[in-house]
Image (spheres, rainbow, N blue to C red):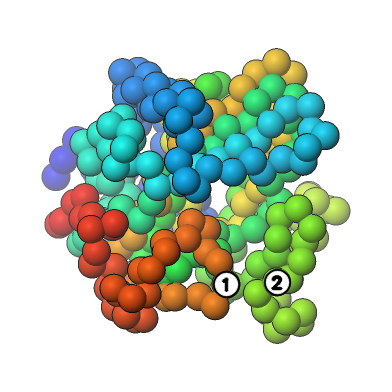
Amino acid sequence: MTAIDRTVIDDATVQQYRTDGCIIIRGLFTPDEVEAVRRGIETNLAEPGPLFGVASQPDDPGRFVEDFCNWQRIPEFEDIAFNSKAADAAGLLMGSSVVRLFHDHTLVKEPGTRQVTPWHQDQPYYNVDGFDNTSMWMPVDPIAPESTLEFLAGSHTGGWLIPRTFRTEQAKWFPEGTLAEMPPIESDRAAYDIRGWAMEPGDVVYFHMLTAHHAYGVPGANRRRAFSLRFLGDDATHAPRPWRTSPQFEGLEDELPAGAPMEHPLFPVLRTA
């Protein structure tokens, strides 16, 4: 048994994660690791990748930007994926013998950003099937409760909810009425089991790709720079979609058949049991 088993992720933590679909782990990353990721984010902002995008409206007084799949060109991102405790923790929470990197994701909300990230599940936007998965989200700035990620506990066990576009809420991928709708959480927050935590650099949340989550904007003078790693476990398979996924892996369907394990250089194995 490793140190992370005994001191950070015990059996109760694993059970809570599997019940709620989300968990916070305090102090998983060292100050040096946080600083390295901070440098990586600043490199990413200065040298955006081909999947870089602005997710806020043009009249937003702040700015919300995101980028994907930069671990192969930004050494700090590669290092945190391959050499930190991130993949070890993911394997324990998933209960998987194999931990595979799906992709990295940079998310930055500048001070004053009004743009809300609406309630959604991640997996409908991805090109993978399977239940063995988890996402890690780490801030490199202190996160106040009003700007943190919030999760609907237990929502990962209920199947897909209809995915909609973030800005216009269009059901572009499934006809209206073919999947259940996201509950009207914001209209009666007290009626739902919402989890969210103020966070310091070094803290991390893990959440299942079907756990509904959202975030408000960033009022005041603080930045909200965050970095995610998405992990796949034992039962993950390739699922080409008839819609554009986020991120999009151009041409992957020509190299990896539908239903095949995610055995491809884009998705390296980070840990095996």
Say the numbered circle drawn on residue 222.
Answer: none
Would residue 149 appear left or right of 56 to someone viewing this image?
left
Residue nearer the viewer, 7 or 112: 112
Residue corresponding to mark 1: 243
Q: Residues within 10 Å of mark 2 (few under 14, many from 20)?
A: few
Quadrant where the N terminus is found in the figure: top left
- Residue 270 location, x and y as percent? 21, 50
Residue nearer the viewer, 223 or 9: 223
Q: Amino acid at mark 2?
A: Lys
- Residue 260 location, x and y as percent? 29, 78
- Residue 50 location, x and y as percent? 47, 46
Q: Secondary structure at mark 2?
A: loop
Q: Give whichever of discs 1 and 2 has the lower sequence position.
A: 2
Q: Is residue 86 visible?
A: no
Q: Amino acid at mark 1?
A: Trp
Quadrant where the C terminus is found in the figure: bottom left
Which residue is found at the position 62% from the left and 52% from the top? Answer: 213
CB atoms of marks 1 and 2 within 8 Å: yes
Q: Residues within 10 Å of mark 1 (few under 14, many from 20)?
A: few
Which residue is found at the position 85% from the left and 53% from the top? Answer: 187
- Residue 5 location, x and y as percent? 23, 42
Q: Is residue 262 visible?
A: yes
Q: Count how many numbered circles sit on residues in the image.
A: 2
Rendered position, 1 above or below 110: below
Q: CA distance from mark 1 to mark 2?
A: 8 Å
Question: Quadrant of residue 184 in the image?
Answer: bottom right
Question: Quadrant of residue 84 in the image?
Answer: top left
Residue corresponding to mark 2: 172
Which residue is found at the position 44% from the left and 75% from the top? Answer: 240
Which residue is found at the position 70% from the left and 76% from the top? Answer: 180
